[in-house]
Structures are given as structure tokens and as C-alpha cells.
Amino acid sequence: MADESYGDVRLAALYDPLDPDRGDLDAYLAIAGETGARRVLDIGCGTGVFALLLADRGIEVVGVDPALASVEVARAKPGAERVRWLHGDATALPPLRVDLATMTANVAQAIVDPEVWRGTLAGAHAALRPGGHLVFETRDPARRGWEEWTREESYRVVELPGVGAVETWHQLTDVRLPLVSFRTTYVFAADGRVLTSDSTLRFREREEVERDLAAGGFVVEEVRGAPDRPGREFVFLARRP
């Protein structure tokens, strides 16, 4: 099921302007280079930022996402014709044979249902060629990052072209580990309109993820830290034998 913030057409259009600095994707671009990937499956591609960065490097990309509004934003971007966009998820992919499968940002944690998680790993495994890699990140639960998801810590005002000023903040709504829920509020100064989006993320322990990958037929090659959030996240690099 698509997160509201990505599935609502009004919010999907704001996703890139509200988060223009995607330096977090540099690590994934580096891994694509390290692995020599020429064909990539971007699971949870969202508005297509990473898929298009890959396409700029001459890489063949398939982007899949359950949020149709986000996929439509991606399809409307310059150069989008270089990417194969799929509306759906990795549990029901067409036949593919890729060198690398990715889940950037919050994608892995947004898959909260254990059955869907296992199905996603199975779909990635099936899409990868033997020797191909899967890479994704997940926050370290021990760091209790959700404690910073307060209005005081997250409040900001962003001036958006054609939209005007937008106030936005996060507010924690429920913690029942491994699930953490929060609400994001958007207030549009131009007309006073208020939109909210409720999200839930699953915080998996490193050992749990490693067991899931092994059960899914992967070999964990390395668990790295995220360069943009040192000490706060695990970046898993796994291989299909």
C-alpha cells in the first residue's frame, strides 16, 4: 500500500521541491559503479530522482512504485522516456534480468508487513542475474531516531515556485516497536489549506535483516554505514549467488 505522502497527487508534486538535496543517493550511485551495474531495478522509485540519475549515466533502469501519483510525477520529468516505469511493487514484477536492485531512502522501512517484505526480497532475487546485487538502507533501532520526530525538531517553512510558502513538520503518533508511526502536516500560506499524511515505518534489527536476506537466498557481502547519516543507519549490500 502506498504511503499517503506519495500517493496523494497534491503531495507527490511537492516531494522533490520540499527535499531538493538528495546527497543520500551518492552512496547508491557509487555502489552502482562498484558493481559495474548496467541494468538496475529501482524498487520504490517514487518520483524518479534516482532512476533518472542512473539513466544519465547510460544505465538501463526499471523503476517500480505502488504510488501511482509519484509514478506520474516521474513520467512527466525531462528524460523520463529513458526509464521503464511500472506502477506496482516488487512482489509482482514482469520477467527481468538486472545487475543491481535498489531500495533507497525509507523504502525498505516503509514495507511494514512481513509477508510483503519477504515477497519484495523474493521479487528482487528473481529479477537479479546470478551474481547480481541488492542494496538498501534501514535505520538502526538502537539510535531511537523517532524521538526527534517532533514539531520542534522538524518544523520548517519552504518557499516553493508557483505554490508559495509551505509550513511542514512531523509529529510522532505511535511507537509500538518494531513499528513507529508519525504524521506530516503541510500548511499552504496562500490559501490556508492544510494537508496531513500518516506514515508507518518498521525498524528492523541488523540481525533480523541478515536472517531475512539469508532466507531469501542472498549472501550478505557487507553492512556499511550511511555516509549522510554516520552511525545512524545500516546499508546492506547482498548478492544473489
Image (tube, rainbow, N blue to C red):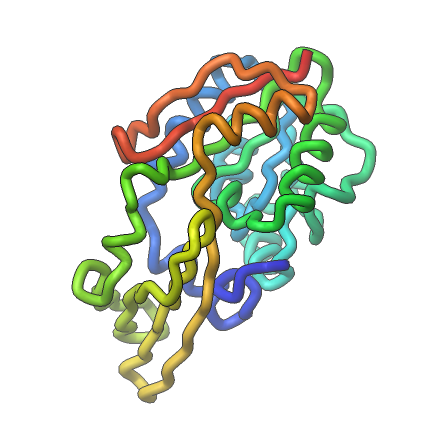
For this view, does 168 lie left or right of residue 126? left
State which quarter of the image contains the C terminus: top right
Q: How many marks?
A: 0
Horizontal and vertical percent position of residue 2: 59, 59
Write the residue at 44% across / 34% down. 205
For this view, does 153 lie left or right of residue 94? left
Task: Give the residue at the far front of this rendering.
Answer: 176
For this view, does 67 lie left or right of residue 31? right
- In the rendered image of this protein, does residue 188 appear above or below residue 9? below
Horizontal and vertical percent position of residue 115: 68, 45
* Closer-to-camera residue (117/28): 117
State which quarter of the image contains the N terminus: bottom right
Within the image, what quadrant is residue 16 found in? bottom left
Within the image, what quadrant is residue 156 found in? bottom left
* Closer-to-camera residue (195/208): 208
- In the rendered image of this protein, does residue 181 appear above or below residue 204? below
- In the rendered image of this protein, does residue 186 appear above or below residue 176? below
Task: Give the residue at the far left of this rendering.
Answer: 152
Write the residue at 39% across / 29% down. 234
Horizontal and vertical percent position of residue 145: 29, 46
Task: Give the residue at the far bottom of this rendering.
Answer: 191
Horizontal and vertical percent position of residue 198: 46, 67
Write the residue at 56% across / 45% down. 45
Write the residue at 60% across / 14% down. 219
Within the image, what quadrant is residue 100 found in? top right
